[in-house]
Image (tube, grey):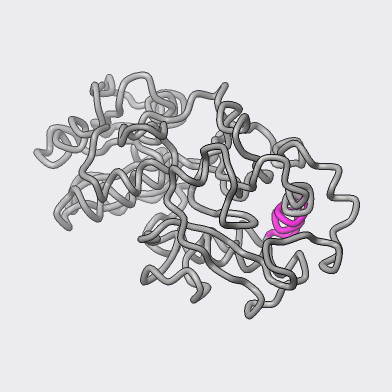
Amino acid sequence: MVRSSSAGLFARRIGVVSTVVLLAACGAPKSDSSSSTSSSAAGSDTSAAASCDKASLKTKTAGKLTIGTDNPAYEPWFSDNTPSNGKGYESAVAYAIAQELGYTKAEVVWAKVPFNNVITPGPKAFDLDLNQVSISEDRRKAVDFSSGYYDVTQVVITYKGSPIDGKTTVADLKNAKLGAQVGTTSYTALKDQIKPSKDPSVFDTNDLAVQALKSHQVDGIVVDLPTAFYMTAAQMDDKGAIVGQLPAADKPEQFGAVLPKGSALTGCVTKAVDALRSKGTLTQLADEWLSKQGAPKLS
C-alpha cells in the first residue's frame, strides 16, 4: 500500500524499510514474525538477564535510560507528539519498562531517531527504541529485539452509518459484505475468523480496499490495528469507523523494543517486558490506550 509521506512515516514501522509500501497492511508473513512472548524473542545477549540491577546496567548515560522513537510520534502510540508525557500506549510501555529496570520517570531521556536509523546496522543514539517495529528474523541480523510488547491484531473498519457500524460481536459480521487485500494475514483472518456467508472482496492493495469502502461497495474491510487507525483518521475523511478488533491469532505479529546489536541490556529489557506481560500490565495499557481509544474488542 503506497501512501503519502506522512502515511509512510506511520506505516513503515511494520513494513519494509526502503519504501513506504505498507507491509503492515499486507500483514507480515508468519515466518517473519515472532511467535513467542518469552525471552526467546530477545536478541543475542539474553544471558545479560542474569544481572539486571540498575547499578550494573551499562546505559549510554550513567543513571539514565535513553529511549528512542521517531518524530513525529503518532497517536495512539504517543500523544501530542510528546513521548515524555507518558500518554499513549508506547509511551506508557516505555515508562513501565524503565520502572521494571529501576529507573524513575525523571531518569528517562527521550531521543528522536528516524525509523531507518533504528533498524539499520551501526551505533545507536538510544539504549532501547519503541517505534512500532515488528520483530523479524531479517531485522534481527542488524539489531536486537526484546520480547514482544504488543501483539498486532486484525481489525474491521467501516464507514459511519453502515450496516455493521456499532456491531459488537464477530457473529454480527458474518452476513456483511467484507473485503481485504489479497495474500495478507488480514484476508486470512477475514476467512478463518469471521467466516463470512458471502464471498469476500479481494483487493490488490489496501488503497483500493479503502476506496471500495468509501464508495460503499463493501460494508467493511479487514486491516491490522495500526493501519485501521490511519485509515479511519486520515483516509476516510472523518467518515470512517473502527468496528472492532478480532480475537488475537495464535501466533501474532509482535512489536518489540529495538536495541543495538549485541547490547548488554537486551536480556534485561526482555526480562522487564516479560514481567509486564505476566503481571497483565501490557494488557491494561493496551485497553487504556488502544481499546478505549476507539478500537473495542469484538466478542
> Is 15 placed left or right of 216 in the picture?
right
Q: How many labels does the image show?
A: 0
Residue at screen point 65% across, 32% down: 35
Residue 2 occupies quadrant: top left
The vertical placement of 25 against 67, above or below, is: above
Give the x, y percent position of residue 13: 43, 43
Q: Nearer the viewer, residue 1 or 238?
A: 1
Examine the structure image and report whether residue 273 is included in the region drawn in magenta. Answer: yes
Residue 250 in view, yes or no: no
Residue 261 occupies quadrant: top right
Q: Give the range drawn in magenta.
A: 271-280
The overriding secondary structure of the stretch rendered in magenta is helix
Residue at screen point 82% across, 67% down: 54
> Is 183 placed left or right of 128 in the picture?
left
From this viewpoint, which residue is outermost toward the bottom?
106
Give the x, y percent position of residue 236: 17, 49
Residue at screen point 66% across, 76% down: 107
Q: Nearer the viewer, residue 65 or 287?
A: 65
Examine the structure image and report whether residue 191 is included in the region drawn in magenta. Answer: no
Q: Which of 4 and 141 is in front in this view?
A: 141
